[in-house]
Amino acid sequence: MKIKNKVLKVSTAIALSLSLAMPMATFAAGPKVKYTQPGVTVQSDAAFVRYVSVEDIKNSLKDKGPINVSFDIDDTLLFSSQYFQYGKTVLTPGSFDFLKDQKFWDYVALEGDSHSIPKLSAKELIKMHMERGDNIYFITGRTRGSMYKEGYLDKTANNLKNYFEMKEVNPIEYTAETPRDGFKYDKSYYIKKHNVSIHYGDSDDDVLAAREAGARPIRLFRAPNSTNMPLPQAGGYGEEVLRNSAF
């Protein structure tokens, strides 16, 4: 009986490990592009990666007036994996089919990220840009809640405003409902539309979309306990990587 219990415990642990390691499904992702050099994850390090601090970014902009900057939301500004874990374990157990269900996105919209955790590194970044007088946009691959119209502030936008102590906030841009308009990557359209100079994100598509739209990409680390696995290789395209940005 003791042997059976041990086997059961080991099997359960393996199953849990595999479940947590499942990659997040992505929709309308851009074409895969090979890294041009070795990169890093938050669990590794490499001297050849172009690390920057918030102060470094500020200094690089000292001779420029106010600019437009944009941020991805999930794993860049907020730790929001709990919503996606709920979808994977409760709504469509063992699969990511919930990402295609408007009911899931309505649930996220109604909760308004009230259970998400703002990243300290993002707070520091946004504070710096606000002090400079820069205009900030939020661009996400999420699907808009069906109760909200385009151009209106939703609960997530209001929570971002509160989390990052912003006086005003622009409506969130949802790329899931927007045509690429000839671009390879979803976020390129909005980066170009808003004349963004710097785009911040955790994913490969964030970096590649910024470059496609003519913006400067800066990568933030994805937290190692995110449900969005595997971790991307930050700096793998030679882009700048914000130090200590996993939290």
Image (spheres, rainbow, N blue to C red):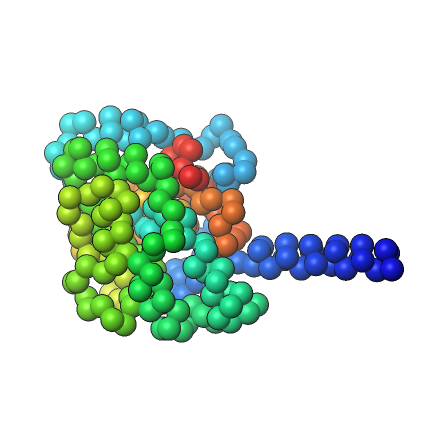
Does the image show residue 70? no
Q: Locate the N terminus by quadrant.
A: bottom right
Name which residue lies at 84% across and 60% down. 4
Q: Relative to 247, does residue 57 appear above or below in the rendering?
A: above
Q: Whole-percent x and y of residue 195? A: 17, 49
Name which residue lies at 38% across and 53% down. 115
Nearer to me, 146 or 231: 146
Does the image show residue 204? yes
Q: Whole-percent x and y of residue 169? A: 18, 50
Q: Indicate left or right for 189 with 92 as reference.
A: left
Q: Locate the C terminus by quadrant.
A: top left
Which residue lies most toward the front here? 1
Q: Indicate left or right for 106 with 62 as reference.
A: right
Q: Relative to 83, does residue 168 appear above or below in the rendering?
A: above
Q: Whole-percent x and y of residue 36? A: 46, 43
Q: Indicate left or right for 18 with 27 as reference.
A: right
Nearer to me, 236 or 229: 229
Residue 101 in which image quadrant = bottom left
Name which residue lies at 57% across and 56% down. 20
Name which residue lies at 18% across and 37% down. 130
